[in-house]
Image (cartoon, rainbow, N blue to C red):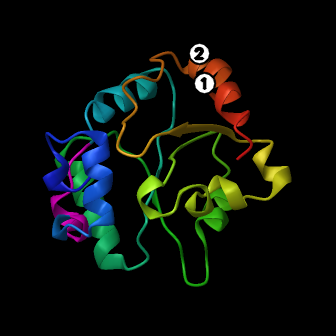
Amino acid sequence: MHRTAVGRSREERVKQVKAKDPSVYDYATYVPVDGVVNKLKIWQKQGAEIVYLSSHKIRKSIEKDKLVLEKYHFPKGEVYYRKRGEDYKDVAERIIPDVLIEDDCESIGGEKEMTYTYIDPEIKRKIKLIIVKEFEGIDHLSESLQKLVDQESHKNLSRNV
């Protein structure tokens, strides 16, 4: 998340994005949301392969994303991004993750901005979706990969996204 979101409520963070706070565009200074790094490491120790989907298309910005991941000791993992002419759904369809954790894109338009919304229905059946509120983080999700896949995905898939 953007650096000025630190110490703010989730709702305040969303307002900052909508108000176009300058730090939202300073990608090199982004910081992790709450306990995300620890949670990802717990899942990785259980065998999860962690990959990241960048919102950027330009190599320079993608490199900033990678530097932030490294700086805050995120688990190592491939950083995927949209290539020329691609949408987010194209990247998801290319990699077909077992589990896709996606925020609800509240600050930028909601469901119509989410990756999962546009994934081909045949491919959707292969992906377990977990939706979190934007800037809420993932601390509340189960530490158990098995429970995460069995419980969380089923609950969120029923949202008809």
Q: Quadrant of residue 9?
A: top left
The residue range painted magenta reads 24-32
Amino acid type, residue under disc 2 in the picture: Lys
Q: Quadrant of residue 64?
A: bottom left
- x%, y% of residue 132? 49, 38
- x%, y% of residue 82? 53, 72
Q: Secondary structure at mark 1?
A: helix
Amino acid type, residue under disc 1 in the picture: Glu
Rendered position, 101 above or below 146:
below
Residue matched to label 1: 152
- Distance of mark 1 from mark 2, alpha carbons? 7 Å
Side of 87 where 78 appears, left or right: left
Front position among marks 1 and 2: 1
Rendered position, 105 above or below 136:
below
Residue matched to label 2: 147
- x%, y% of residue 156? 65, 32
Rendered position, 101 above or below 59:
above
- x%, y% of residue 53? 47, 57
Is the C-beta separation of discs 1 and 2 under 8 Å?
yes
Rendered position, 2 above or below 81:
above
Q: Residues within 10 Å of mark 2 (few under 14, many from 20)?
A: few
Q: Considering only order in the chain, which callout, 2 or 1, is on the residue closer to the N terminus?
A: 2
Q: Residue at x 33, y 53 (%)?
A: 14
Magenta-colored stretch includes residue 99: no
Q: Residue at x 51, y 26 (%)?
A: 47
Side of 3 where 119 appears, left or right: right
Q: Residues within 10 Å of mark 1 (few under 14, many from 20)?
A: some
Magenta-colored stretch includes residue 29: yes
Q: Secondary structure at mark 2?
A: helix
Farthest right residue? 122
